[in-house]
Image: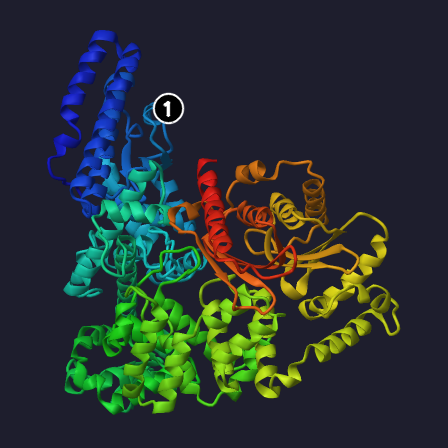
Amino acid sequence: MHVIRIPSPRAVIDRRGLTTQIAALVEEHGPKMARKEILPLLQEALAQGREEIARRLVVKSSAGHEVAEAQAFLIDQILRIVHDHVVTHVYPASNRSKGERLTIAAVGGYGRGEMAPHSDVDIAFLTPIRATAWCEQVIEAMLYFLWDLGLKIGQSSRSVDEMVRMCKSDLTIRTAMLEARYVWGDQDLFEEAGQRFWKDVVSGTERQFVVEKLAEREARHKRMGDSRYVVEPNVKEGKGGLRDLHTLYWIGKYIHKVRSTAELVDVGLLTQREYRAFRRAETFFWAVRCHLHAITRRTEDRLTFDLQREVAARMNYSDRPGKSAVERFMQYFFLQAKVVGNLTGVFLAQLDEQFAQRPVRGLLANFRARPRMLKGYQVFGGRLRATSDKWFAEDPLRLLDIFVIADREGLEIHPETLRQISHDAGLIRDDLRDDPRANALFLELLTSRRDPEKALRAFNEAGVFGRFVTEFGRVNAQMQFDMYHHYTVDEHTIRAIGLLAKIERGELRDDHPLAHDIITKVRSRRVLYVAVMLHDIAKGRGGDHSVLGAEIAERLCPRLGLDEEETELVAWLVRQHLIMSATAFKRDLSDGKTIGDFVAQVQSIDRLRQLTLLTVVDIRAVGPGTWNSWKRQLIGELYGAADDRLRLGHAQYGREKRIVAKRAAVETLLGQGNPLIEEIGKQFGDAYWIAEADDVIAKNLAQFAASGEEPLSIQTEFYPARGATLVTVIAADHPGLFYRIAGGIHLAGGNIIDARIHTTRTGRAVDNFLVQDPLERPFREEAQLERLRTSIENALANRVQLLPQLHARPDARPRADAFDVRPRVLVDNKASNRFTVIEVNARDRPALLNRLAYTLFDARLMVHSAHIATYGERAADTFYVTDLLGGKLEAANRIKALETQLLEAASEVASAAVAA
């Protein structure tokens, strides 16, 4: 029988002392009247016990098991005290019948003797037959005591027969009872229930239990994001977390009746070394979970951004050069999650072996499949297995070769061999890293035409990737503390390589038509794959990771067997891997200077193709939802313009030809000979025809004609081509129009992702906005579209106070408060021939764009286009402006004053939002 033993138990709770005090109170007041005195006594004991446990967690911040066991011990003692008081004083029965027996069992995690401070208390009341009146009275009285103490009770009351029946039909109940632990009451009855459970429920259902538990685990992983490396992990339910460790224990217990995780070694499911890793990971996760409960004072198992810093501080992590305390803490967290994944693999492999060794009955009893040999490895059941314990020590090159063979042949590596590889990964030293054969094998794995993502993930999980490419080892399990990146650096990189392979295999033709078209045209596949592998290799080193990564590429590529030209191209791609997204999302692509500057950096069509492919997989591998049709459109637009410029040169890139082509496309949409193009189109300048898409121009002309002499026309519609809502406002142009429209859109719950502001020759403004909700989804419903129109109309009519209402709006992403985004303003007169380009980086808030636009209006500047990019909690808002006379902002003192005003506006919004 499992008994919880903790250091200095009486410092947590003194059961004997409390029992004596309760007996004295009953004697003085009687059982009924004493309840008013007993309850505060127990409440105080519970509070003091929790305080002592919290103190122990502070003193010994990583002692997860000790704290979890102390919490279970505290609840045990409370239950025992309450039980004894009820059966001794409230409902005493001197001559109980055989049916008037009751046992209290802890089940679930509490049954294991582990509890976080605010976990539910799961208990089972068991009776020999259907509960008698006395049993029901005792159970009810106990529950009322426990509820009044503020405990969250998960309870069941069943006879032994009912318990057996329910366990047979319900996997959750069966798993809970699997961990049943005697707490108090009739011990013989508890033993009898245990025997019935093993005999009537478990016997003969072992395989079924394993299958169902693993299916349950898979479903949970999918629900939680299906990766060990999501940057806001769930400590309990997430992949690689506590529940995965518990699943291994449950399986071991169900099959071998182990009573503790240590016994998994005795039954051959883990080695002693693996058990120590199991225990280390479990202790760490328990400590994190206990800290989460202590900080939030509730059942909180999600390690969200706002809690990560605090848990890291409580667990005594500190900053290091290039890595903050929270990043170091989370890196250790993900390394432990990785350990859990490895343990799961070897555990299940051992289980397979044990099941395979059991005698087969029936027709197949005399038939046994035979293993075959492949390049010195044994192949059986689709798995490669090393043939001796010294296999890798005899030739460390095999540590790479086995992964290449597995990939080539479409085989798995036997988890027992993966265990051996992890153990022998230390054999990888400089002589192997410099061996051309080893580097050729690695390059073959990286550029595999089969499934490099699967191969590289196994390579990484086994600990070989980080040993062979030591620079990659430094980003292993490294998180990026922001709301943009969903995965650790190594996981993001491997996913990006997998996406590249899928594009190459033609599996993502619909999602990435441009990438699908150009991937077969790049001059060097291996340049592309190596660049994807290295693009984030220098994260966490301090300094610009693109520049530092290029330096690593220049050192590493020759070792991998790339020639001088290939090395130079990889280094360039790593150094410039952010330039395409920055240009596409933060610059005006209708401005010839934007394209000219970009092309000057790129210089060749092959570089353009390579860079485009790297940009696409980099963005998409950030996480679910980061790639959308709007980004696809912008990247495609930039690629097309740059490709034209590189192929045809500047002369062929003339504005007149583009305008003629655009007019022809619009005429096709409106119908040949449509008078709108001549009648209304002539009111728009060349810049309008270049900036807007042909379908948007067609919509604008029709709306302009329909608006007639109306002072204001607002049109909103779902625009599937851009994955957004198109909002067009036609009104008499006046200063402040832009900031008011922006404020109205934000008050309606919209985020502006792009804005183009035009003024006709007759002085009317035609402003086009692309709008999404805070979760990057378009507004589609008519009620949403109407709300947008009404809100803009109210803002333009000055019926609402914009700034106070915007500040009062709740932030759609309140966890952004966990991040410190220092506002930054860049004023650039070289990025455009006609406009001054102003870029503001700041914390993303509902009032930000409106406040910045108001500041530009107040500085007597005209906004001609705005481009809004968000990267998690960070916004990058870019404005193309002129002064009121149409000239650039040239005066140094005026630029300095504007920078100060914009910084103040961005800081003001952040502080107002915090105050709100």
Q: Depth check: 185 or 265 in front?
A: 265
Question: Is residue 182 among what the camera can see?
Answer: yes
Q: Element at badge 1?
A: helix
Task: Give left or right: position of 387 versus 781.
Answer: left
Name the residue located 36 percent from the left edge and 59 percent from the top edge.
239
Where residue 72 sits in the image (x, y, percent)? 24, 38
Outermost top residue = 28
Against 212, residue 612 (above or below) is: below
Q: Is residue 304 visible?
A: no
Residue 284: give x, y in percent of width and height: 23, 52
Q: Quadrant of the N terminus?
A: top left
Q: Quadrant of residue 258?
A: bottom left
Residue 556: horizontal and vertical position, in percent? 29, 82
Q: Nearer the viewer, residue 457 or 421?
A: 457
Q: Amino acid at mark 1?
A: Ala
Residue position marked by numbered label 1 in the rendering: 133
User: Depth check: 97 or 573 in front?
Assistant: 573
Q: Is residue 321 left or right of residue 306?
A: left
Residue situated furthest left in the rendering: 8
Q: Position of residue 751 (x, y in %)?
A: 58, 52
At label 1, counting other C-alpha atoms closer than 10 Å, the crowd grade (few under 14, some 14-19, many 20 or more) is: few
